Amino acid sequence: MNEEQQASLLAEGALATHYLFRWLHPDEVEQISRIEEICFRSGEALSSAMIEARAQQVEQSFLVAVSCREHRVVGFVSGIQTDETHFRDAFYADPSLHDPKGKSLMLLGLAVLPEYRGQGIGRTLMALYLKAKQQKYSLDRAVLTCLNDSIEMYEKMGFRLGERANSQLGGRSYVEMVHYFGANDHCWIRSLCAKDIPLIVQAERAQGWQASADKYEKRLLDQHEGRAVALVALWEGQPVGYINVYPCSVWGPASWRGYPEIVDFGVLEKYRCRGIGSRLMDEAERIAFERADFVFLGVGLHQGYGSAQRMYVRRGYLPDGKGVYYHDDILTPYTSCCNDDHLVLYMGKRRPAQ
């Protein structure tokens, strides 16, 4: 049985009777172009040349829905693979950015002709496409951009709201949405929101921590004013961890030197050992290394920081060589102090070679 037949069998109910879901044929490029013109605004619809180039250079980039009665394409979904984790507009026009070994699937279009909507064609296209790509390439994630009024639709397809997208297509503002495959389905990372704060504080108090909303409100304000990137990890929709990146640190050895610092990293105790902390650190380091070739962080010295200490060493962080800091000042030798949260060892990591 070939892949075209397998894809068509995956559709259920009336859709399987009336529509065939298969990979694009070379002579159907103009039909895709026509659907683009109908479904997307001027400045957003791709040209026939762009579509043809992607279809020729990227194997199985387009999955289409074909009407069995009219024998024409009525909808499609398309994408390319990369090892990048965030969307950029260059993916639309440059098929050479496709990397068949890449673990991220960048979705470049989902469209169904207006007269065929409301039957689940778009949802089926997306489900079949994600399943086929994951089975063949063992992907980590699928990423798309959309307008605010499409967020709910994509959430129903299994995507989670991410960051503001780095996209200027058609001069409009977009958000990223991410679908994590496999074990990552339960967890995703996005920017901290005001609604997260009381949930985090309540959960931290329940596990015996002295939590206060003030700290998180300060992070949110710093993010709003451009001084920080505040991230939260969600597990099945609930905030369970957090991390912050200050692109230009004002503390410790990195203060006012133009280096980023990772600040205030935590995961709720009952959600540890699930890879959530690593996911948060991966994203924080990605953001930091976009701005500099070195990143700092501080870690406490009492046993409550034991897991973090081990993680930082495993990730390649080294002490800065200046000893420990107390209340943000270097602690001179033989000075007495309290081993509390203000006693900190600063560590740094250089951006790995590409």
Image (cartoon, rainbow, N blue to C red):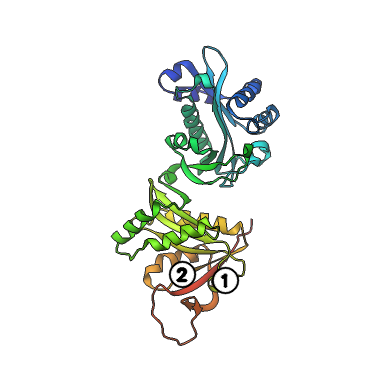
| 10 Å crowding of disc 2: few (<14), some (14-19), many (20+) | many
Mark 1 highlights which residue?
255
Taking depth in this image into account, of 272 and 264 the one nearest to the observer is 264
Residue at the top extreme of this rendering: 69
Mark 1–mark 2 CB contact (< 8 Å): no
Q: Which residue is mark 2?
A: 299
| Image-based side of 142 in relation to 354, left or right | left
Image quadrant in which you'd find residue 182: top left
Within-10-Å neighbours for mark 1: few <14, some 14–19, many 20+: some
- Please state the horizontal and vertical placement of residue 211, each as a whole percent of the image: 35, 63
Q: Is 65 on the left-hand or right-hand side of 301?
A: right
Q: Quadrant of the C terminus?
A: bottom right
Residue ID at (37%, 57%): 272
The percent coordinates of residue 301 (x first, y second) are 42, 73
Q: Earlier in the sequence, mark 1 or mark 2?
A: 1
Say if 168 sits above or below 9 in the image: below
Give 13 or 226, whichever is nearer the viewer: 226
User: x%, y% of residue 27?
Assistant: 66, 20
Residue 96: % across, % down: 68, 39
